[in-house]
Amino acid sequence: MTGESNTSVVLRNRLRRIEGQVRGLERMIAEESYCIDVLTQVAATTRALQAVALQLLQEHLEHCVRDAVDRAGAEVDEKIAEAYAAIARLVRS
């Protein structure tokens, strides 16, 4: 066993599917597919990436932020600021 976490495996599998979606988009563009069909696939790919981002954010909150809180050190504010910045980037995207 490689020691890779289940979450890491799930995320890597999702990213491989997204990679396939992007290759499909490239193919659709090359084949000059109907624009609305391409846009529909772009939206699906965007949602898939957002799902990965949300999973990563959840992991950060459950592990990094919780660990900082448990240690009750100055790192808590830093971890909360990191999480806030990540959420702000997601909302703006």
Image (spheres, rainbow, N blue to C red):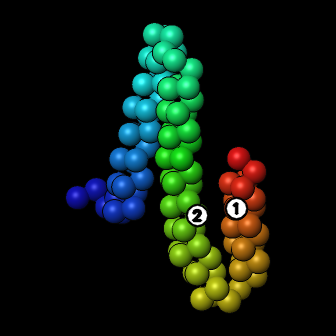
Q: Is residue 53 visible?
A: yes
Which residue is found at the position 44% from the left and 38% from the top? 18
Q: What amino acid type should be assigned to the residue bearing mark 1? A: Ile
Tell me whether the residue at label 2 lies in contact with that at label 1, contact meaning CB atoms closer than 8 angstroms.
yes
Is 41 placed above or below 56 here? above
The image position of residue 48, as x and y in percent, is 49, 46
Residue that mark 1 sits on: 87
Residue that mark 2 sits on: 57
Q: Which mark is residue 62?
A: none
Is 67 placed above or below 93 here? below
The image position of residue 45, as x and y in percent, is 51, 39
The image position of residue 51, as x and y in percent, is 51, 54
Which residue is found at the position 75% from the left and 59% from the top? 88
The image position of residue 41, as x and y in percent, is 49, 33
Dot 2 crowding, Cα within 10 Å, few <14, some 14–19, many 20+: some
Q: Is residue 82 visible?
A: no
Q: Which residue sits furthest top?
A: 31
Which residue is found at the position 50% from the left and 26% from the top? 37
Left or right: where 53 falls relative to 90:
left
Give the quarter of the image for residue 81: bottom right
